[in-house]
Amino acid sequence: MKKLLFSISALILFACAVSGQDRPTAFVNARIIPIVGQPIEQGVLLVQKGKILAVGDATTVKVPADAVVIDAKGKVIMPGIVDSHSHILEPAGGDGSGPIQPDVRVLDSLNVQSSSLQRAQAGGITTVNVMPGSGHLDSGQTMYLKLRDGATKIDDLMIYDKDGKYMGGIKFANGTNSIRAGGGNFPGTRAKSAALVRDQFIKAQEYRDKIKKAAGDATKMPPRDLAMEALVEVLDGKRVIHWHTHRHDDILTVLRLQKEFGFRVVLHHVSEAWRVADEIAKAKVMCSIIFIDSPGGKLETTDIKFENGAALEKAGVVTGFHTDDPITDSRWLLRSAGIAVRAGMSREKALYALTMANAMILDLGDRVGSLEKGKDADLVVLSGDPLSVYTHVLETWVEGKKVFDRSDPKDHLVAVGGYGASNDRYVDDDEEDKDEGGN
Amino acid sequence: MKNLYRALFLLLTASCSLLTAYGQLAVKGETVWTMAGDPIANGVVLINNGKIEAVGSQTSIQIPANYRVITAKVVTPGLIDAHSVIGLNGYLNQPHDQMALEGSGPIQPELRAIDAYNADEKLVEWVRQFGITTIHTGHQPSALVSGQTMIAKTIGKDVDEATIVPTAMIAVTLGQDSLAGQGKSPGTRGKEAAMLRAELIKAQENSKKADPPKDLRSDIMIKVIKREIPLLITANKSQDIMTALRLAKEFNLKIVLDGVSEAQLVMNEIKASGFPVIVHPTMARANGDTESLSMEDAAKLKAAGIPTALQSGYEGYVPKTRVVLFEAAMAATNGLSQRDALALITIDAAKILGLETRIGSLEKGKDADIAMYDGDPFEWTSHCTGTIINGQVVSDVVR
């Protein structure tokens, strides 16, 4: 009998927990920076089942009676930060066998137990583009991931497109990183780098023509070629190239190749963007830039400037910011916006760069990057203004679920570092409190 | 004749402008952080002949009519980077401008920083534009004893003009970072300590000789044994920190602990030793021996009462140097008050470098080294609007 009662109460508790997950969550009294639209004082953000139901002030958004209400008075809520270029989760791309390896996927290398995932959550990052390195002209396919909690396998972090395919781009690089003097079949010069890439795209065009000619006849199809298949996706605009490029001449080379082959490309790092901002604008490509604390460290970044953000804004280029973690740490991507504003970028565009611009760079502009009805409930609760050094990320929410809470000692350790903070964290070590009001 | 007059006139104007440059300045600030007492609201610093002549509120100090007046929102002492490698290492990061590590042997205390320092290095100019006026720089923490350090002002056309202390400390590194290649020594932590002890024993013996051997290494090591020059011991893991303290005790050394990523584990021992600490950059990467570093370490050391300064440290890649102002800003948002965070890069750093009578605070008689900002110096969106060294405006870039 006692056992039965226990079971019943357990069942009731369980049922409550389930219904709790379906109840809407209302963040009230916060200053809300929706990115698309003006900031809202004393705002209300209503989320349910991982999506945003409504955003507005108390007069326009009614909090349902059954909502879990979170009073965020004195705090600032903005969309979850998107990092358009990161190397968290230990990604590995192409090996030393050749300079162009479109067949290689970071998918097959990622470690979801890596402590770097928690670090990114602590920085308010909710969506990330995990890339292979820049030591190849093409080091392989990248992955767009949601930093959900409790992942045991990479599938748990994937983002799927409308056709049910997991999303990602492809990494290219030019300049010195992918030039290897005496490196076998690797290029030795910039011109050779461009020639090798052009050569592959011409092959991919031919491969695509063969497929077209086969017109569905399996006997006439060319043999399967993983590298060619990936490059055909690029030619068809289904896979965006994320192109590591620093110097002004290398930037122009990317634009030249883009014009020749018509692929979709985002320029990454773009250290000398300030020199060729108008050319970038004219080509209508987007940029993902980085801020580093001093110029140099490598020859191609001797002329990098804090002013890149302002220069690209002035030229009208859609610009996002990235960490390139571990080059800069995921925990202070927010700081990039402060530095950008320091060097003349507008406050609005700097915050846009952290969120909406990065979302667009990853073809996710309709799902993340702003607090708008129908979008994913990815958000960050800040202790103050996003541009201030004194502001901390207090909470990070992904799809309506709290994944980081600075007031939790374990999460605080990740946020500031310390003994044990760099250890990989296993799932059973991070049991979510089911009563936190998330869904 | 006309030409002679013109020449004379030019000479006079030139010397006049030079006088102004070196001469009399009044720096007004809405907030003046003297670091020798509370900040002064609407304060002014009078500068005469490279030195601070007076500091106080604008109501209490009359600015002489012939003084050039510069106004800033916030005025601080020139910032001090307590441990860097810039000047020896340059921003290009190519073999010809990387001079902070000599790979030919694990123990080379005879290597002088002044023989490698490039006063014209772009990174020196870069940090100067953020208000950093003094750097403790030298051989990098990547060999057991990598060489000497020096202290320089971030000005000067050459090393002689820049240098204020030619040999400040000897850079020692314990732990993984000073392990030599396979088959070479040191190959373990135990061997590192054994090699250091052997070197110090030799120095002890030489110091007792009436006629010690004439030898560069012996000369400098005798100064270490005689406590004339401190060892700057980079030790991040707790066992390395303990080794540093053990060696200091055995040989009665003067040391400065550097890095101390695991200070949190041996805080009492560090405190009891009485040695000061130059803590890792707040935003340093946590990997290898530094895997346990915390952004709250500076605050915890300060709370324990341990004399602490902050550093930009050594970087092998991008960024080639950190900016100690930014590192202090991050410390200020991770447990330290604004004032304590500023002390890490001003007066407390000056004390650890033994220069507190000359730099680190705005007080009468000290070097006129001043940084100016258009807001809270720690805010990412504020700018350094000017830097003054020895009474000269050496930067007016808004950075």
Image: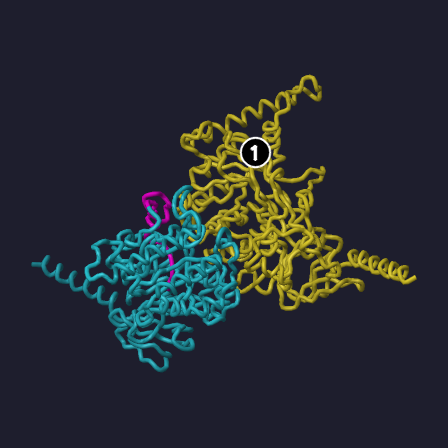
Residue sitting nearer the eye, A147 or A220: A147
Side of A239 relative to B169 (left or right): right
State the residue lying farthest toward the right.
A1
Dot 1 alpha-carbon crowd within 10 angstroms: few under 14, some 14 to 19, many 20 or more: many
Residue situated furthest bottom in the rendering: B60
Please tell me whether the stretch drawn in magenta is mainly helix, strand or loop.
loop
User: Left or right: where does residue A33 sit relative to residue A338?
Assistant: right
Helix or strand or loop: what does disc 1 sit on? Answer: loop
Quadrant of the image occupied by residue A122 = bottom right
Quarter holding the N terminus of chain B is bottom left
- Tell me the yellow chain: A
Q: Mark 1 points at which residue?
A: A263
x, y (%) of residue A277?
Answer: 46, 44
Q: In this view, does A154 lie above or below B51?
A: above
Image quadrant assignment for residue B226: bottom left
Q: Among the chains, which one is cyan?
A: B
Residue B196 in which image quadrant: bottom left
Residue lying at the far left in this picture: please name it.
B1
Let me know if residue A156 is in the magenta part: no
Q: In this view, does B43 lie above or below A277?
A: below
Residue B53 visible to the viewer: yes
Q: Residue A4 placed where, x, y %?
A: 90, 59
Q: What stretch is highlighted in magenta?
A: B80-104
